[in-house]
Image (cartoon, helix red, strand yellow):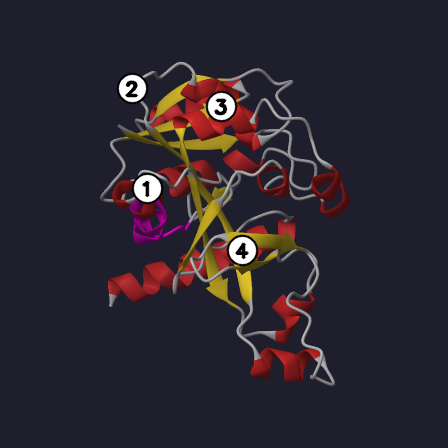
Amino acid sequence: MIVGIIPARFASSRLYGKPLAMIGGKPMIQHTYESASKSNLLHKIILAVDDERVAEAAKSFGAEVMITPKEIATGSDRIAFVAKKIPSADIIVNIQGDEPFIPGRMIDEAVEPLLFDQEIMVSTLAKRITSLAELKSSSVVKVVFDYQSFALYFSRSPIPFVRDAATLAEGLKMVNMFKHVGLYVYRRSALLKFTTLQPTDLEQTEKLEQLRMLENGIKIKVVETEFDSYSVDTLEDLEHAKAFYKKYLKKKEK
């Protein structure tokens, strides 16, 4: 069984109460749930929440909910907590709760490698960077991968470094560079193993949890996607999301 789990933490440091932030009359967590429901490959979607207010909101729009302990620090640990209670979940998809407009097809793209190759334990997505602002931003994680599309490294810095380019802009024109889209698909065994591992040196240096997998020899398949998703981390992001949704509704009415 393929299970999508959406972790939703109420006490976000940058946007308190984020799962219940309203976008066009619906809480953000409902948008994420409804977007994920458009996937053709997920058999079940569960919201992993740490607050009764979010649980009640989720139940009101018909979502399956599991309460997780508030002291769980990371989304991956929250996902693993839920996965342990679902023995039939062979493949687990970690869908970020703050991506209200994630395309269902994007989820399916990430899942597909595990359906066709039993050796693949973890997969994720990457999208080609076309903007210099994205390349420069430390909040946009970059990824490089090998000829079999397995991740070599993730970084907040622009990678690869293009030695023959005089500027970053020139380097971006010379070489394909990719940003990491933070959607993960795990085989059950890989997820449970990952969440037992101690934080690693590179992970703590870059503040990127996925480096723990690479440092421990867990290979991550990278699927290139043409889709993009929009993460809501700040109040400014929320206002952009509201404007985006308003435009979407107007376009839908035409």
Sequence order check: which comes first, mark 4 or mark 2? 2
Sequence order check: which comes first, mark 2 or mark 3? 2
User: What's the residue type where badge 1 is placed?
Assistant: Leu
* Quadrant of residue 1 within the rendered picture: top left
Q: Residue 84's spot in the image, x, y percent? A: 43, 16
> Does residue 220 lie above or below 68 as drawn?
below
Judging by the rendered image, the residue that carries numbered circle 2 is: 88
What's drawn in magenta, residue-wise? 101-112
Q: Is label 3 in a helix, a strand or a loop?
A: helix
Judging by the rendered image, the residue that carries numbered circle 1 is: 114
Judging by the rendered image, the residue that carries numbered circle 4 is: 180
* Quadrant of residue 155 within the rendered picture: bottom right
Q: Is residue 83 visible?
A: yes
Q: Is residue 104 magenta?
A: yes
Q: CA distance from mark 1 to mark 4?
A: 19 Å
Judging by the rendered image, the residue that carries numbered circle 3 is: 192
Mark 4 and 2 residues: CB-CB less than 8 Å, in contact?
no
Q: Residue 34's spot in the image, x, y percent? A: 33, 41
Q: CA distance from mark 3 to mark 1?
A: 16 Å
Residue at the image point whose x is 49% and y is 31% from the top? 7
Sequence order check: which comes first, mark 2 or mark 1? 2
**Number of numbered discs visible in the structure rendering:** 4
Q: Decide whether the magenta segment is chiefly helix, strand or loop.
A: helix
